Image (cartoon, rainbow, N blue to C red):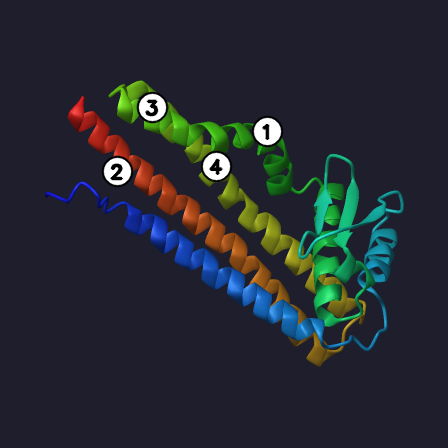
Amino acid sequence: MYYPYYFDPTYLLVILGMVISLIAQARVRGVTAKYAGVAARCGLTGADLARQMLDDGGLNDVPIEVIAGNLTDHYDPASRTLRLSQEVAGGRSITALGIAAHETGHAYQHRDAYGPLVLRTAAVSTVNIGSHLSWPLVLLGLVFSWQPLITAGILLFSLVVLFTLITLPVEFNASRRALATLEGQAYLDADEMAGARKVLSAAALTYVAAALTAVLQLARLLILGGRGRRRS
């Protein structure tokens, strides 16, 4: 089929990925903002909750660092450090407690040598290389009509896709651990738990969107690679 030189139908995959990502980001911003305005009755800050959860889980030696930014919260397996944004660390809202509990759930995973987390941590450096080199290799392969370069780029990007898929069980499991603790230890009441579930579900949606976007990008690479083979 003929397409004008200025139109590449594979861009539709890019646009679809962008739409999915924007919807997920809008959802998480809206939900977290809503429940950031609802104070939890327990009166704990996010940092207070995380410290109690870490100590109860035998992780007294895991420090909590307060960092700048919005939704920059994360657990760093390399340094065994829990990092919370200022809004979460000092916040007493359902959003703050839900996010703090989720990130502490990652610390629990590390303690338990949770398989997907171990695999994801081990793959980080390789995936970083793949994410930076995959598209340049494919483009060079298309320009010079050299299929081995295209194939190498596709294989490298496949590692990126695999990484996003491995991330899904890691994030879902951390949320399950967080919700189980928030409810089991009565940090949140029943009505507050409904809000926490919405916050963590919205956050999980961003990882699902990232995985779908990566799959769509891989599909585009495969289509472009197929064109390269036909031209060579």
Q: Are marks 4 and 3 in contact (CB under 8 Å)?
A: no
When the figure is inspected, residue 218 is found, relative to residue 153, above or below; the finding is below
Structural distance between the alpha carbons of marks 2 and 1: 27 Å
Residue at 32% in and 36% down: 221
Residue 121 in picture, x, y percent from top left: 63, 35
Badge nearest the viewer, 3 or 2: 3
Residue, disc 4: 160
Q: What residue does disc 2 label?
A: 223
User: Residue at (32%, 42%) from the top-left corner?
Assistant: 219
Mark nearer the N terminus (2 vs 1) = 1
First of labels 3, 2 by sequence position = 3
Check contact, mark 2 vs mark 1: CB within 8 A.
no
State the separation of the CA atoms marked 3 and 2: 16 Å
Q: First in sequence: mark 4 or mark 2? A: 4
- Please tell me whether mark 1 sits on a helix, a strand or a loop: helix
Q: Mark 4 to mark 3: distance in Å?
A: 19 Å
Q: Nearer the viewer, mark 1 or mark 3?
A: 3
Q: Amino acid at mark 1?
A: Ser
Q: Residues within 10 Å of mark 3 (few under 14, many from 20)?
A: some
Quadrant location, the C terminus: top left
Dot 1 or dot 3: first in sequence order is 1
Residue drawn where x is 23% and y is 47% of the image:
9
Question: x and y percent of residue 113 in the render?
Answer: 70, 39
Q: Residues within 10 Å of mark 2 (few under 14, many from 20)?
A: few
Which dot marks residue 125?
A: 1
Judged from the image, the secondary structure of the residue bearing numbered disc 2 is: helix
Please state if 203 lies on the left or on the right of 22 as rendered: right
Q: Secondary structure at mark 4?
A: helix
Question: What amino acid type is highlighted by mark number 2?
Answer: Ile
Precedes in sequence: disc 4 or disc 3: 3
Residue at the spot of label 3 = 140
10 Å neighbourhood of mark 4: few (<14), some, or many (≥20)? many
